[in-house]
Image (cartoon, rainbow, N blue to C red):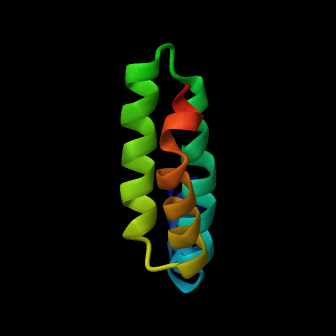
Amino acid sequence: NLWKYINTRKHLYKALDINRPLATACYLKESLRRVWWQDDKQNAAIALDDWIEQARQSELKPIESIAGTLARHREGILA
């Protein structure tokens, strides 16, 4: 039913808006996995650098701290 779908999406967006920090943290947690899914070091480096940039812009202090840690250990992660 189209109306049920529309109402469900409205509730989802409202919940995500209310819980934006949680939604952002969950998204970043899942997107970090992309680094390890890459076929080669170059693509892994791109994915890691993208993730670090997104995390630094998240305005979530714990996530920003993790981004700093990953940036400091970038070479070891990509080895």
Can residue 7 be seen here?
A: no
Instruction: Classify 79 as above or below 49.
Output: above
What x and y, as percent, mark residue 13?
Answer: 50, 72
Pick whichever, 71 or 22, lies toward us: 71
What x and y, as percent, mark residue 30?
Answer: 62, 48
Write the residue at 46% across / 20% down: 41
Numbered marks: total: 0
What x and y, as percent, mark residue 24?
Answer: 53, 67
Pick whichever, 18 or 67, lies toward us: 67
Can residue 28 be seen here?
A: yes
Q: For residue 56, which quarter of the picture?
A: bottom left
What x and y, as percent, mark residue 21?
Answer: 56, 78
Q: For residue 45, which quarter of the picture?
A: top left
Write the residue at 49% across / 36% down: 75
Instruction: Classify 75 as above or below 27.
Output: above
Q: For residue 23, which quarter of the picture?
A: bottom right
Q: Residue furthest top?
A: 39
Which quarter of the figure is the C terminus placed in? top right
Pick whichever, 1 or 6, lies toward us: 6
Write the residue at 45% across / 41% down: 48
Pick whichever, 56 or 71, lies toward us: 71
